[in-house]
Each structure stands twice: as structure tokens, then as C-alpha cells.
Amino acid sequence: MKCPFCGSEDIIKGVVWSGGMNCKTVGLSEKNLLGRQTHQVCSDVCRECGTIVRTYLRGYDYLKTQNISWETEKEQNAD
Ligand SMILES: [Zn+2]
């Protein structure tokens, strides 16, 4: 993988996202009958310039087999 910004191939893969000490998980939101669930995301980061080259859901091989009701901006505004 190449950084689209600086062209470097020095990419750190699978860096996990964090919300800091007071936040347990940062990620994409699923809203279903049981409430809300957060699905963790990871990013690949260019070591040369710090660009986040790719962001993706952690463990997506499993998630894609599930029928997940992703909470979109549209649904959030309807609350
Ligand atoms: Zn770069």
C-alpha cells in the first residue's frame, strides 16, 4: 500500500482508535432492539507524513455475516 499524499510505502497497519481515558470505545454505531453497540475501527497510518490512509471496521469478516443495523446520521436526527 502506498500513501496517496506523500507516496511512502511505510504504512503502519491496524492502529486502533481510542477516545482516551474516559471513553471506552470509539467506533461505528449499531442501533437495534437491544440498544446501541459500538463497533471498533482501525486505521492504517503513513509513518512518513501521518496521513490516515485507510479506516476500517475491526473483525469485519465476522461482521459482514451479521445483519447489522448501522446507525446513520439520518436516523440520529430523527431521535
Ligand atoms: Zn504519507
Image (spheres, rainbow, N blue to C red):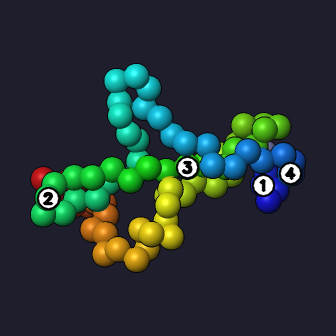
What residue is disc 3 on? 42
- 3D distance between C-alphas at marks 4 and 1: 10 Å
* Residue 65, above or below 34: below
SS label for mark 1: loop
For the point 73% across and 45% down, the residue is 12
State the residue position of label 1. 4
What residue is shown with label 2? 34
Q: Nearer the viewer, mark 3 or mark 1?
A: 3
Q: Which residue is mark 4?
A: 9
Q: Quadrant of ligand 1?
A: top right
Q: Position of residue 43 (x, y in %)?
A: 60, 48
CA gap, disc 4 and disc 2 = 43 Å
Closer to us: 51 or 69: 69
Tell me if label 3 and label 4 are in contact, CB under 8 Å: no
Residue 65 percent coordinates (x, y):
40, 77
Indicate the amino acid at tag 1.
Pro
Q: Amino acid at mark 2?
A: Leu
CA gap, disc 3 to disc 1? 18 Å
Which of marks 3 and 2 precedes in the sequence?
2
**Residue at (22%, 52%) from the top-left corner?**
36
Disc 3 crowd rating (10 Å Cα; few below 14, some 14-19, many 20+) is: some
Kindly give the residue lying farthest to the right in the view shown. 8
Left or right, residue 5 beside residue 31: right
Q: What's the CA distance linking mark 1 and mark 2?
A: 40 Å
Q: Which element type, helix, strand or loop, lies under badge 2?
A: loop
Picture disc at residue 63 = none
Asked if the beta carbon under badge 4 is closer than 8 A to the nearest atom of ligand 1, the reply is no
Name the residue type under label 3: Cys
Say which amino acid is labelled 4: Glu
Q: CA distance from mark 2 to mark 3?
A: 25 Å
* CB of mark 1 near ligand 1 (< 8 Å): yes
Q: Nearer the viewer, mark 1 or mark 2?
A: 2
